[in-house]
Image: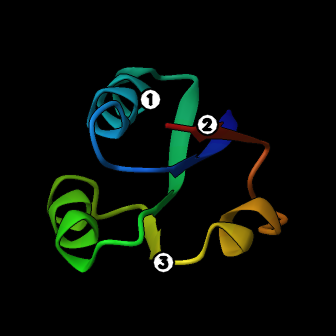
Amino acid sequence: MLNTGLIGYGYWGPNLARNFSQNDQIHLEAICDFSESRRRQAGRLYPQATLEQQPEKVIQNKNIDAVAIA
């Protein structure tokens, strides 16, 4: 299982999050966006993911194997 983080939930981020969550080999661990409304939207769709405002928290998370930046 590959634990992933996603930085950016604007234009491409929702597409990446959807693809990650539909793949049995990937666990979407964290989603980061500066916008509170975008984080809320992501949280409704992906409640398993930790929501972050600061990209550094995703990058430094020891549980995350790969980070996608959108």
Amino acid carrying mark 1 in the image: Phe
On the image, the x and y values in percent for residue 42 come to 25, 58
The Cα–Cα distance between marks 1 and 3, rounded to whole angstroms, is 20 Å
Residue beneath disc 2? 68
- Position in image of residue 36 (x %, y %): 26, 79
Dots 2 and 3: beta carbons under 8 Å? no
Q: Amino acid at mark 2?
A: Ala
Residue type at the position of mark 3: Gln
Labelled pair 2, 1 in contact (Cβ < 8 Å): yes
* Label 1 element class: helix
Q: Quadrant of residue 4?
A: top right
Q: CA distance from mark 2 to mark 1?
A: 10 Å
The residue under label 3 is 53
Identify the secondary structure beneath mark 2.
Answer: strand
- Of pointers 1 and 3, the one earlier in the residue sequence: 1
Q: Is residue 9 left or right of residue 55?
A: left
Horizontal side, residue 66 vs residue 5: left or right: right
Which residue was labeled with disc 1?
20
How many C-alpha atoms fall within 10 Å of the one at disc 2: few (<14), some, or many (≥20)?
A: some
